Amino acid sequence: MTTHQISEILKNLNPEQIEAVTVRENPLVIIAGAGSGKTRVLTRRIAYRIATGDADARHTLAVTFTKKAATEIKHRLEALNMREQIEAHTFHAAALRILQRFWESKEITPYELIESKFKIVSDAISSLGANTKTYKSRTKTYKGNFKTENEVAAKSLVSAVIAEIEWAKARGLTPRAYSDAVVAHRRNTPLTPTEMAQIFSRYEELKSKLHKMDYDDLIIGATKVLNSDPMFSAAEHYRMRHLYVDEFQDINPVQMSLVNALTDDRLDLCVVGDPNQAIYSWNGADPTLLTSLQNRHHNTRTVLLSNNYRSTPQILSLAGSILNGGSHPNKKLIPNLPDGPTPVIRGFNDDKTEAQSVARLAKHFRQPGTGWCDIAVLARTNSQLIPIQKMFKESGVPAFLAGETNYLNQSEIRAIVNSLERQNSFLRGNSLFAWLEGIVENSLSKYAEVSSASDNLNIFLELSREYLSTTPDGESRGLALWLKTEARNALDENAGESVTLTTFHKAKGLEWRTVFIVGMEDGLVPIAHAESKEAVLEEQRLLYVAITRAKRDLILTWARQRIFNERYLKREPSPYLATLQDEIQRISGHIATSEHALSSIRKARRNLQDDSSDKMDLSERQKSIMESLRLWRSQKSKELGVPAHIILHDFALVSVAVQEPSSLEALSKIAGVGSTKASKFGKDLLQCVEVPDTSQRE
């Protein structure tokens, strides 16, 4: 390739990016911050090494997590005149190709890939005698206090066992190692760890006898053949001698094992990732594997991409305040855009008013030269976005719910909704969701050849999960009604010239000029079930991802009341809003809000600094309670490994001290506590309130 062509590859790159593209050391770790040109650098490095003769296009493999990302890598390389056939696949697709080559080389009949685990897991349970007294006892009580032993109970158990097997396989656990692992992780399992291990083992045996593999087996199987057959492994190493891995912060232990097997002792490996955007631990992802890679090879070269070309300095400053230095503190994003508007926090009386305001503001931000597609509304869960879409439609603002289709009109979904309406009312909560999982598993098998049906079924299950997470005791007919009323507004199949409505997770990798982050409330941001230190840190990173989607305008909103299951529930602001508000004050010197501003947070901030109780007119007894509450919060913060404000805000502590609640119900009504934290910490808080009253002593 000519000098001119190489110059074109390096064109418009900054010094950091040029270093990442041209450095010769291997392995190479590229820490690419949000908006730093990650995909550009990855594809330019591939092209540069091929153009300079340092790598062979025919022996280059790029691995990523989605088909969309793999396709984008190919298209970008083609735009750089890389016409050679460079392989770019998802982890599972790459693993399947390795297995296919292995089967062909050994003249082994290819394994059949199963679409649904339901029948084989059912057979595994039955073949082990788990349908005897022990099994019946479990089905009567498992996750829902079943009133009868029937098919619903059986299906719910099978679905739960499937989920548990998938959890184990994502972490590379064998049936033998399973029991110890669940004890170490303190997991609640559908059956005893011993019973689960037996079923897990039997499931693997049945698959082997049937000459079948499930989706989870692909990466495990490819890793196994690479590690066990030296001749085949050597051939694969020659075939794929230059390996690139995108989004490395999302890798799980099983995928890491495949990377290790592919590279062996060779060091021609380049990985790109950002620890501050690691948000998939629920899928087994472990961002510490990035560090372990650096430690494994002492000569690993690390290049930091710290220049951000997406967001204004104000937005980057706000995002950074959430991370407190981030998972990779040496990397701070450097803005390359001029100053923009100060981000805004707005509070509303209820979610309807919130939706109305967002719709009105969306019209305001659609200015000449911009379109509806330059605006996005992000929320922690899909269910929060459905009333937003309804209000947008009423306001004449075109919008689509990302990932959603006209699923309620599809035959596979209509059948399930009809079944929901016929179910007895005892099917509710966890037992309802377990039953739905079983129905969806069977439907996935039935519609295996119809990709749109599979998408619709998965969307249905996700919406059902979110409905039940906000209505834990929700029953079948209530879910059916909700789907036919609120959820039916999520039917727009075409993004086109529309505002994007999507979740924090789905927004990763995308960007918009104007971003609204709605539902900034405790229990949603962070999500209620995030209790461990690791889970809380991931919630912080998730909010960081959401904030860094914005290029210029950023508006964060919350509501004091939100409808759940057709009734209003009182909400409290997200604990992160106090930190964000402080940063906004630092940026602009004041808080930019409307008449619906966060008055409760402002008052709390004025009155409740570190020595807030001393500045307020508290009685001696109230001061004593405050001292007890602060001591408890400090101990709980150290115990859980999370910041003190995540436990309870200062203004919540003062409210408890002043109101002196005597019951969990009274405690749950206090601003800043709410039902979630009253349930979690109520006993301790009530004990703190019960300090001796010294005010009446002589």
Image (cartoon, rainbow, N blue to C red):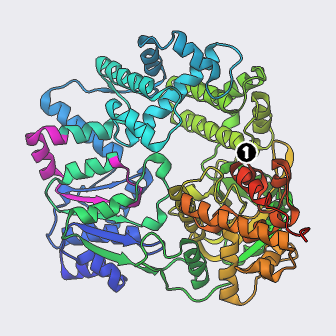
Farthest residue in the front direction? 698
User: Where is mark 1, residue-wise?
Assistant: 470
Q: Position of residue 116 (x, y in %)?
A: 46, 26
Q: In the figure, is residue 218 to the left or right of 577?
A: left
Give the number of callouts.
Answer: 1
* 389 relative to 81, above or below: above
- The part of the chain drawn in magenta is 226-253
Residue 227 covered by magenta stretch = yes
Q: In the figure, is residue 77 to the left or right of 531?
A: left
SS of the residue under disc 1: helix
Is disc 1 surrounded by few (<14), some (14 to 19) or many (20+) residues within 10 Å? some
Which quarter of the rendered picture does the N terminus lie within? bottom left
Residue in the foreground of this view, choosing between 538 and 476 = 538
Q: Position of residue 477 (x, y in %)?
A: 79, 28
* 551 relative to 27, above or below: below
Q: Position of residue 219 (x, y in %)?
A: 31, 41
* 62 relative to 24, above or below: above
Residue in the foreground of this view, choosing between 265 and 53 = 265
Residue in the foreground of this view, choosing between 546 and 376 = 546
The residue positioned 64% from the left and 13% from the top of the image is 150
Residue 223 covered by magenta stretch = no
Q: In the figure, is residue 674 to the left or right of 133?
A: right
Regarding residue 442, the answer to whether it shows in the image is no
Quarter location, residue 8: bottom left
Regarding residue 134, the answer to whether it shows in the image is yes
The chief SS type of the magenta part is: helix
